Amino acid sequence: MKKFSILILEVFLKYIARAIIQKYNPMIIGITGSVGKTSAKEAIKEVISCDRVVRAPSKNFNNELGLPLTIIGDFDAIGGVFFWLHVLCRGIYKIIFREKTYPEVLVLEYGIDRPGDMKKLLDIARPHIGVFTAVGKIPVHIEYFTGPEQVAKEKAKLITQLPATGFAILNADDPLVMRVKTETRAQVVTFGLSEHADVRVTNFSNHFDGTHAGISMKLTYGGSFIPLRIDGALGEAQAFSSSIAAAVGLVFGMNLVKIADTLSRYEAPAGRLCCIQGIRESMIIDDTYNAAPKAMENAIDTLSSLPAKRKIAVLGDMLELGKYTLEAHEELGKRVKKKGIDVLITVGLRGKLIAEGAIHSGMGTKSVFVMDTIHEAVRLLEQKIQKGDLILIKGSQGVRMERIVKQIMAEPERAKEKLARQNIEWISKKGMYDEGE
């Protein structure tokens, strides 16, 4: 009965959202990819908001319920029956009566879990500008696909369905993304580290002095370049988000100077390689929002590149990888050893595979700790953290690794401000490895 009710709700939301788009005709920027969608969304919003009224979802609203929810209004959480009745009434009101403040630009995430999902989302809203962030060797949500190529093909539908007057923003560094370049009618603008990228990131560097962190780079386009520094964030993923936002800004007619000035004020979303002061004068790299193999690799590489007394990786399960689960986790363990991480702490059943991969690659058993629950990991960290430690914490959403961050951050009273998933609904929700689970 519940499933049927959701299907009915999805139908109503779909047609209301389509009617609103037809009435207000906003410019739609659609973002897809296996990693980096949310950071790209926030960076794009930061840039375009200079000149336009922009709406982007404040939460991960990227499915058949979330996509129309963003089109209808600026909601920051999903509720029960009365909430959805309010949404439906609000949507109908906007169809009947014109809302003067309706946004000129919508920035929407298009997330897929299974074959056919992208068509459902495109039936709700077709973008004018499509962004394809990355796929990677083993993409997230691959569980219901035959392989990375099929995942890329499903996501690529967003790009192939763009109008001839539209723009496709593609990752020049990802071969699976670049395959779609010849399949779209839209004008293509590429981004990335590659020398072939239209909007290229050069001279990238992470900066960390023990208490403050940031990244610096140059954004290059058409023979011109502009330096850019972003404080409080780490990793090449943020550089990619900046180059995506720059590409979109250029499509909107902005110049590099204005784009860079805007991006310098950009703040990385919570749980995406953000730096938080930890107990005993340690520093936490909070990357707990979610985890895919490529994002895990990027996080390990970022930790490895920074100076610290000790580098500690606290890693939980990566979910929805299907037949690639064993390979992905063991490969991550090998990377931990290869990158010279001093201490590895794993959480969960799949996390044990990371530990095994690290030990089989030669990491000393005294440096590897396998924890069954979040609470066990917290207790271990409370015992082991020392002044000058740099601690990466990352895992899939269902593992709830942000709960570890909350327990070892220097100012836990700022958790709601600093961490992912701090609303009442998520706080009360059981994680996979809570104590007693």
Image (cartoon, helix red, strand yellow):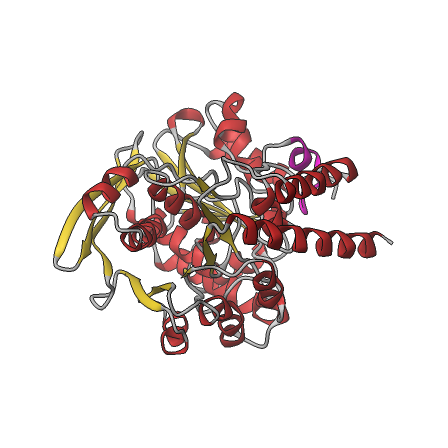
Residue 196 position (above or below residue 277) = below
User: Of 366 and 180, which appears nearest the observer?
Assistant: 180
**Residue 378 in picture, x, y percent from top left:** 57, 35
Residue depicted at x 68% and y 43%? 92
User: Of 229 and 298, which appears nearest the observer?
Assistant: 229
The quadrant the N terminus occupies is bottom right
Residue depicted at x 42% and y 25%? 280
Residue 435 visible? The answer is no
Residue 271 position (above or below residue 132) = above
**Horizontal side, residue 127 vs residue 242: left or right:** right
Residue 211 visible? The answer is yes
Residue depicted at x 19% and y 57%? 221
Classify residue 83 by image quadrant: top right
**Residue 315 in picture, x, y percent from top left:** 51, 49
**Horizontal side, residue 4 vs residue 118: left or right:** right
Magenta span covers which residues? 424-435
